[in-house]
């Protein structure tokens, strides 16, 4: 019989945890028995998220701030150990999907910010977790990447490039920090989040019809994958990428959608924050995707 609380006695730090995938991950880990430290930029949304978890009986601590600030990251690691008794699990979820547009026109400052948030912050926080707790006690790190890190798409060069770097960082750290610490990546496809709303809002039916699983993802789909990777059930898994995408990478084999429509026109639009993009299915949906702009990153 499976342990109903596989993470009992452990502590977890989740970044970008005020909503979407981050909050779903925090809720999943808490339900598995972990004590949770949540961090995100917006203190109001962060406290609202924490309140939902506390109302369910979970132990939650919060610290608002941006992962782009090294001082904030140091405070998070120290608070986890001081207030929760350790730092066994780290989920680097916070991200930005800006700058959006052709790289030839990208603002260099926004480009640097993308790498600060999406790559440097996960490295810094992993270093802090290692020094504060994991070097002596072990632990598990999961970096939230994207299904789209392995290919290109219009207007998402900064996001995709930074996430590709994060995926490589995941493998490098796994090799360096084992066996005490396991480091893995979860790479979502298109998930129903505010960050990716501009992709799915007006084209969900066409997108879903092109996917083998027949729907776009929900935050809980990703959260369950994270929970498994940080549990003892995945004790011999490190340096890997777990793609949670509803079949985005294999959709080229699809001969028809669940509604009988053909979902294979060969296009490959990727949306920032979507973790991959909009499977084909309708020319109108593709035009809407390319004409829209993302919400600010988490």
Image (cartoon, helix red, strand yellow):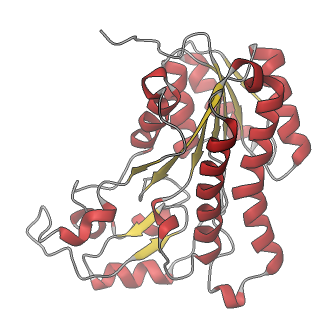
Residue 65, by quadrant, is top right
Residue in the picture at 77% in, 32% down: 129
Where residue 222 sits in the image (x, y, percent)? 44, 42
Residue 71, by quadrant, is top right
Quadrant of image for the N terminus: top left
Q: Nearer the viewer, residue 103 or 133?
A: 133
Badge count: 0
Where residue 91 sits in the image (x, y, percent)? 62, 38
Q: Nearer the viewer, residue 21 or 46?
A: 21
Residue 222 to residue 3: above or below = below
Where residue 230 sits in the image (x, y, percent)? 53, 29
Residue in the picture at 79% in, 39% down: 127
Residue 62, by quadrant, is top right
Residue in the picture at 66% in, 54% down: 169
Extreme residue toward the bottom, this view: 104
Does residue 230 appear anywhere in the picture? yes
Residue in the picture at 32% in, 71% down: 279
Residue 218 to residue 296: above or below = above
Residue 147 to residue 101: above or below = above
Left or right of 266: which side holds 62? Answer: right
Left or right of 101: which side holds 230? Answer: left
Extreme residue toward the left, this view: 260
Does residue 16 appear anywhere in the picture? no
């Amino acid at each position: 019989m499976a342990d109903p609380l596989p993470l009992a006695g452990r502590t977890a730090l989740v970044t970008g945890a005020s909503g979407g995938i981050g909050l779903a991950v925090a809720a999943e880990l808490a339900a598995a028995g972990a004590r949770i430290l949540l961090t995100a930029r917006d203190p109001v949304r962060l406290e609202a998220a924490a309140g939902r978890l506390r109302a369910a009986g979970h132990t939650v601590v919060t610290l608002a701030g941006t992962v782009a600030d090294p001082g904030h990251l140091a405070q998070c690691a120290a608070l986890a150990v001081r207030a929760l008794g350790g730092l066994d699990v780290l989920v680097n979820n916070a991200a930005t999907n800006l700058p959006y547009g052709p790289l030839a026109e990208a603002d260099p400052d926004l480009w640097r910010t993308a790498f600060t948030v999406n790559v440097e912050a996960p490295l810094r926080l992993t270093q802090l977790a290692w020094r504060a707790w994991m070097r002596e006690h072990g632990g598990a790190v999961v970096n939230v990447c994207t299904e789209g890190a392995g290919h290109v798409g219009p207007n998402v060069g900064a996001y995709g490039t930074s996430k590709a770097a994060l995926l490589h960082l995941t493998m490098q750290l796994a090799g360096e920090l084992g066996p005490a610490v396991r480091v893995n990546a979860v790479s979502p496809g298109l998930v129903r989040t505010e960050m990716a709303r501009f992709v799915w809002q007006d084209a969900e039916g066409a997108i879903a019809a092109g996917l083998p699983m027949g729907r776009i993802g929900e935050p809980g789909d990703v959260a369950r994958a994270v929970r498994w990777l940080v549990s003892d059930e995945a004790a011999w898994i490190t340096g890997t990428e777990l793609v949670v995408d509803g079949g985005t990478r294999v959709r080229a084999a699809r001969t028809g959608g669940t509604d009988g429509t053909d979902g294979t026109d060969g296009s490959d639009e990727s949306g920032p924050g979507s973790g991959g993009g909009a499977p084909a299915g309708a020319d109108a949906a593709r035009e809407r995707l390319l004409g829209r702009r993302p919400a600010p990153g988490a």
